[in-house]
Image (tube, rainbow, N blue to C red):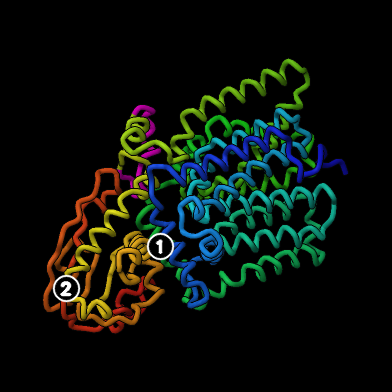
Amino acid sequence: MKGITGGNPLTPPRGAWAIAVVTVAAHVLVAGVGPYELHRDEFLYLAMGARLGQAPLDFPPFIAALAAAVRALLGDATWAIRLPSALAHGAMILLTASLARQFSASRAAAALAAFAVAVAPVYLRAGSLFQPVVFDQLWWTVALYALLTLHVRDDPRRWVLVGGVMGVGLLTKFSIVFVGAGVFVATLAGHRRADLATRWPWLGLAAALAIGAPSLWAQAALEWPIAYQMAGLRAGQLDRLSPFDFVLGQPLLLGPAIVLAAVGAWWMVAGPPREWGRDAAVACLVALGLLALAKGKPYYGAPVYPVLIAAGCAALSQLGAAMRRRLALGGAALATAAFGVVAVPMGLPFLPPARMAAFAAAIGVGAATESNTGAQLALPQDYADMRGWRAQVAHVAEVWKLIPDSSKGTAVLLATNYGRAGALEHHGARLGLPRPVSAAGSYWFFGPGDRRGPWVVSVGPDDAAAITPYFEWCDWYTHVAERWVVPEERLVKVWLCFGPFTPLDELWPRFDPRGVGR
């Protein structure tokens, strides 16, 4: 069978290496000296890493294990925490170029594929933050690469490799099941259907389940918290979306590269690579269709595009006439570069808030600064979620000082959302604060701690009726933050309370996010 040609996948073209190195360096530089702090989600993953092995986690454990490793090796500097994400983005750039070369793309076309993945906001933003998103994108790309090599080499034993990569995906984010479903549908409908009568695809499934077992075991041990997480997402964010919104959101994530991806999908299905490329393309399209039907956020579909972009660039580089090839590739490169000028500030957080807000307003793309709940912000929400945490923690530390020194060893520090809790945990120790407790989401599973008061400092809530009934006495102190933070953090009440009527460990089951004990 004729298959992928064009070189060793471990040696992408020099142009792709240059793009990857510059991209990783930009991520690290911005993380080190940029105008933004850690993101609220990053605080949560660091907190998970600090508790790794102490109790089951309600999220797949890859990000927690990586957090623990990075902090042990490199410390708590923002650039160090974000280095793995930057490297993952760089790896995706190189992998896309390798795919293009092995689709028999020219070196220039492979460099174009690498550049498209480097500047697309959906990859640039993911590579800027310590979150599972960029690693999820990487594992999907590796799994699809493995599927292509299985078809090219006509070697069913490679199903075990495909399954193994998807197992790593299960350790990272459960969304890997969408491309897994796509692979199954493509295989069932494709020319490798006969493989299902052999042991190899099932050994691949066993490998996926075995490697991903820690994620599945933790879910079972905690009574499947993913169910309440998805219910919360649907109620707060996804219900306002439609399949049409998902489809319309794809061009904003990729810019002109969406055309390259569309060309690549068509070429893999109907062009020269159809004998060995069709199943990977069908798997991508099925995954996108399922995500659209599930009313997923537009960026959920991003992991399918590196392989499609690589194929699209290869298709352009193989147009019949040399002039047509040069015009097609040159036009695509100019369009991608022009888009990059606009897209890079939306993906790489290097502009200070005032300039970033002015830039976002100037380009006039409201969706880029829309919050998860549909509210319009001055900054992209991820950027707003990276401001104000140090100042908030410093204010809490001032309130904490009001507790008598003799009582500080037993006093409780509460937080009413995971961003506040994570920021207090990350920054608070330097200011003499204890580890906080919180009943918000994942933090609830960490438990109420071993402090019993009678003094309590609580960051939030805004409504007195939500806290004063639990104590003999409460007073509050307002923290007024800068305008660039997310709306709920602009005016935060920090409560100093005394004399809880009921011990915190007895109250804890009432706040179970799964609804148990209410």
Rendered-image quadrant of the C terminus: bottom left
Quote the CA–CA distance across marks 1 and 2. Answer: 33 Å
Q: Amino acid at mark 1?
A: Ala
The structure residue drawn at horizontal position 34% and vertical position 40%, both measured from the top left corner, is 379
Can you name the residue that lies furthest to the right here?
1
**Residue count near mark 2 (Cα–Cα under 10 Å), binned few <14, some 14–19, many ≥20:** many
* Residue 465 % position (x, y): 15, 68
Q: Earlier in the sequence, mark 1 or mark 2?
A: 1
Judge whether residue 484 is colored magenta.
no
Q: Please, what secondary structure does the residue beneath circle 1 have?
A: helix
Can you name the residue that lies furthest to the top here?
323
Is residue 448 something that shows in the picture? yes
Q: Please, what secondary structure does the residue beneath circle 2 have?
A: strand
Magenta-highlighted residues: 362-375
Q: Nearer the viewer, residue 240 or 135?
A: 135
Tell whether 108 sits left or right of 420: right
Tell whether 106 sits left or right of 508: right
* Residue 212 % position (x, y): 62, 67
Residue 16 placement: quadrant: top right
Classify 26 as above or below 472. Answer: above
Q: Amino acid at mark 2?
A: Cys
* Residue 432 % position (x, y): 30, 68
**Residue count near mark 1 (Cα–Cα under 10 Å), binned few <14, some 14–19, many ≥20:** some
Tell whether 120 sits left or right of 438: right
Rendered-image quadrant of the N terminus: top right
The structure residue drawn at horizontal position 39% and vertical position 38%, both measured from the top left corner, is 367
Residue annotated with mark 1: 231
Residue annotated with mark 2: 497
Judge whether residue 372 is colored magenta.
yes
